[in-house]
Each structure stands twice: as structure tokens, then as C-alpha cells.
Image (cartoon, helix red, strand yellow):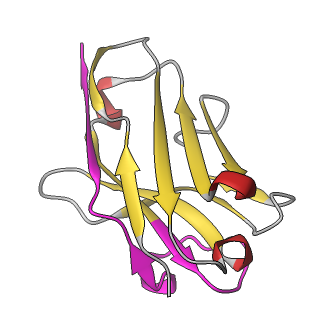
Amino acid sequence: QVQLVESGGGFVQAGGSLRLSCAGSGRTFTSYTMGWLRQAPGKEREFVATMSWSGGSQYYADSVKGRFTISRDNARNTVYLQMDSLKPEDTAVYYCGARMSGYGLRSPTQYDYWGQGTQVTVSS
């Protein structure tokens, strides 16, 4: 089992940057596929980015491709989401999720564990 804690959210103007962190507990953290998903008010949770346990496979939603970068530091049990060129439509609560196996996990139902979320607000 793994516990996840997100941090790094905040308020930023359009065009700005933020880096989100997701710290995981548990000695098997390095075995988990990790993902970032987000949920805006009144909308369903949607896929943003995911990375395999080794970091060798990365997938992004079309809406963030070229602007967001997912990375992980298994020595620190931490996954990051670097968000550049932020837009108002990126405003949402961002969640990190984990699953023991799998690649390219895009659906929220594919993740077994979640953090509590961190709010990102982008003003125009």
C-alpha cells in the first residue's frame, strides 16, 4: 500500500509556471506507475500525465503536451509535474494517483491510490 501527499499548488497568472510534487510512502513506491489527473469544478476528473515505474514511458493529455512535464525521483519517493505556460483552463484540483502495474493509465478508475489533491488557480 502507498500513501500520497501532493503539494506545490497555488495561484499564478496566465503564462506562469508551477511545479507540483507528490510524495509517496512505502518501500514499494518505485514499483508503482504514477499519474497526475485534475478535476475542475463541475467536471469529471481527467487525465493529465502518467509515467511508468522506471520513468521510461510517459504519456500526456493533448491539452498539456509541450507545456507540462512529469518526472520522478524514486530515491526520494516523489513524482513531479512541472507546469509551464499555464492557461486559465488549467485551473483545477490536481491529484496524483498510483497503481502497482500498467502503462499509459489514462482513466481515473485505473488508479488504486490517490492523494488529497492540491489546488491550482490560473488567472487571465
Instruction: Note whether 92 is above or below 22 in the view shown.
Output: above
Position of 66 with respect to 46 (left or right) is right
Q: Position of residue 4 (x, y in %)?
A: 42, 66
Task: Identify the image quadrant of residue 58.
Answer: bottom right
Q: Position of residue 22 (x, y in %)?
A: 48, 53
Along the line of sight, the residue nearer the viewer: 51 or 75: 75
Position of 10 with respect to 52 (left or right) is left
Task: Identify the image quadrant of residue 38.
Answer: bottom left
Position of 103 with respect to 83 (left or right) is right
Instruction: Note whether 34 is above or below 120 in the view shown.
Output: below
Give yes or no for residue 118 being in the magenta stretch. Answer: yes
Q: Which residue occupies 43% across, 22% down?
A: 86
Instruction: Note whether 59 is above or below 90 in the view shown.
Output: below
Q: Which residue occupies 43% across, 58% down?
A: 37
Query: Would residue 62 be visible to someone looking at this image?
Result: no
What residue range appears in magenta? 97-124
Give yes or no for residue 2 being in the magenta stretch. Answer: no
Along the line of sight, the residue nearer the viewer: 33 or 123: 33
- Which residue of the protein is positioned furthest toward the left in this rendering? 42
Q: Which residue occupies 73% across, 78% down?
A: 31
Q: Position of residue 108 (x, y in %)?
A: 42, 76
Position of 28 with respect to 2 (left or right) is right
Instruction: Note whether 112 is above or below 7 in the view shown.
Output: below
Along the line of sight, the residue nearer the viewer: 88 or 50: 50
